[in-house]
Every structure is written in C-alpha cells, then in structure tokens.
Image (tube, rainbow, N blue to C red):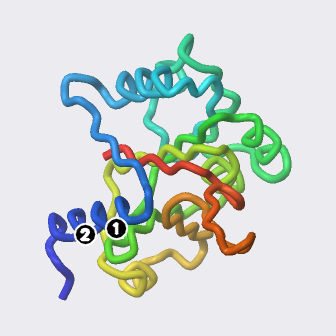
C-alpha cells in the first residue's frame, strides 16, 4: 500500500536536496506567472523556451523580462529545429506529469521532441510541479504509465564522473534543475 501523498512529497523533497536540485516555493501573494517572471529576471535568464505544461499565459507574462525563443506549451515543433532553438536558450520551463518519491525523479510523458528538448538542452531546467501525480516507486509509476508516450525520467542535474573520476555537472544535460512547488 502506498504512503499518503504528504509523506511522498516529504520523501521527494529530501531526495531532491540530496541530488542538488534547487527547490523554490512561490509567494502566495503572487500568481505563478508573476513569480516566474520575477524569478527569470532575478536569475538573469535572458532567453527561455517553454515546454508542454508551462503555465497558460506565461509567454505573455514574460514579455519584456526575457526573450521567449519558442513556446511548445501546446505541443508544436520538434526534432532538429527544436534542438537548435533550445540550444540558444538560457533556461527551459516545463510542466511535470509525475514525481517518483523514493528517487527524487521528475517525469515528463510526451509525444513531441519539443517537450524533451526543452528540459534536456538548455543549461537550466525549471520544472513546474502543478497538479502532478505522486508515486512512491518507479514500479508504481510504470503500472500507471501510458505505453503510447515517451517517458523522460529526470533525477537531478546531469552528472558524470567519467573524466578523471571527478564529478562534473551539466555534461549531458542541464547543469541546474530548479523545481517550482
């Protein structure tokens, strides 16, 4: 039997901290879009791409604060064109479909390359945890997963210790992962 959602979220947050994932909690006095606008400006992200699950109206809210290179929030282009655009962005902003508590994993289930490129290619991935499903284990998630979709599992910033056995972040993906709760 699965743990209560509050326990899953607590375990998930513990794992995120272990994985060097940054957790930010918007002020209740601001809308999510207003918070993201302020956050993007404060972090000096001069260009962003928006993936599926980015909040409705975010592109308009970011006007004047940063350059939105592409908005894939309602689907859209993929493939090499999305990769080229995402490579120019300072940050990618996506929604998240599920979390896996015991590993601190974010899950994006998608059909388009634009979704994957937005979270994988820019040096910073900003993940929005709005309305996500919480699972205790990967096995729990896989039982419920739609087999017709691509499931991207993100467990912290990209990391490798291949080079001189020193841990290096950001070699194969984002150097920073920021979760907006």
What residue is shown at x 34% (from left), y 57% (from top)? 132
What residue is shown at x 62% (from left), y 69% (from top)? 150
Q: Which mark is residue 140?
A: none
Mark 1 to mark 2 CA distance (whole Å): 6 Å
User: Would residue 128 appear left or right of 111 to someone viewing this image?
Assistant: left
Secondary structure state at the residue bearing disc 2: helix
* Residue 83: % across, % down: 78, 47
* Residue 53: % across, % down: 48, 46
What residue is shown at x 35% (from left), y 59% (from top)? 17
Per the image, the residue denoted by label 1 is: 15
Quarter of image, res 169? bottom right
Q: Are marks 1 and 2 in contact (CB under 8 Å)?
A: yes
Q: Report crowding for label 2: few under 14, some 14 to 19, many 20 or more residues within 10 A (C-alpha).
A: some
Per the image, the residue denoted by label 2 is: 11
Q: Quadrant of the N terminus?
A: bottom left
What residue is shown at x 37% (from left), y 44% (from top)? 180
Q: Report crowding for label 1: few under 14, some 14 to 19, many 20 or more residues within 10 A (C-alpha).
A: many
User: Would residue 107 appear left or right of 102 to someone viewing this image?
Assistant: right
Q: Which residue is at the front of the view, 119 or 150? A: 119
Q: Is residue 173 above or below residue 141?
A: above
Q: Which residue is at the front of the view, 178 or 109? A: 178
């Amino acid at each position: 039997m699965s743990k209560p959602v509050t326990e899953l979220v607590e375990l998930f947050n513990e794992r995120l901290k272990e994985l060097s994932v940054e957790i930010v909690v918007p002020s209740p006095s601001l809308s999510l879009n207003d918070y993201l606008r302020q956050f993007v400006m404060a972090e000096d992200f001069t260009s962003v791409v928006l993936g599926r699950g980015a909040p409705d109206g975010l592109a308009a809210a970011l006007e004047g604060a940063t350059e939105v290179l592409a908005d894939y929030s309602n689907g859209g282009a993929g493939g090499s064109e999305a990769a080229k655009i995402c490579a120019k962005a300072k940050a990618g902003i996506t929604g998240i479909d599920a979390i896996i508590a015991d590993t601190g994993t974010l899950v994006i289930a998608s059909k388009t390359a634009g979704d994957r490129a937005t979270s994988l290619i820019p040096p910073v991935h900003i993940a929005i945890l709005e309305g996500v499903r919480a699972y205790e284990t990967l096995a729990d998630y896989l039982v419920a997963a739609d087999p017709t979709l691509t499931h991207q599992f993100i467990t912290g910033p990209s990391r490798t210790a291949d080079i001189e056995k020193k841990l290096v972040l950001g070699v194969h993906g984002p150097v920073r992962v920021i979760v907006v709760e």
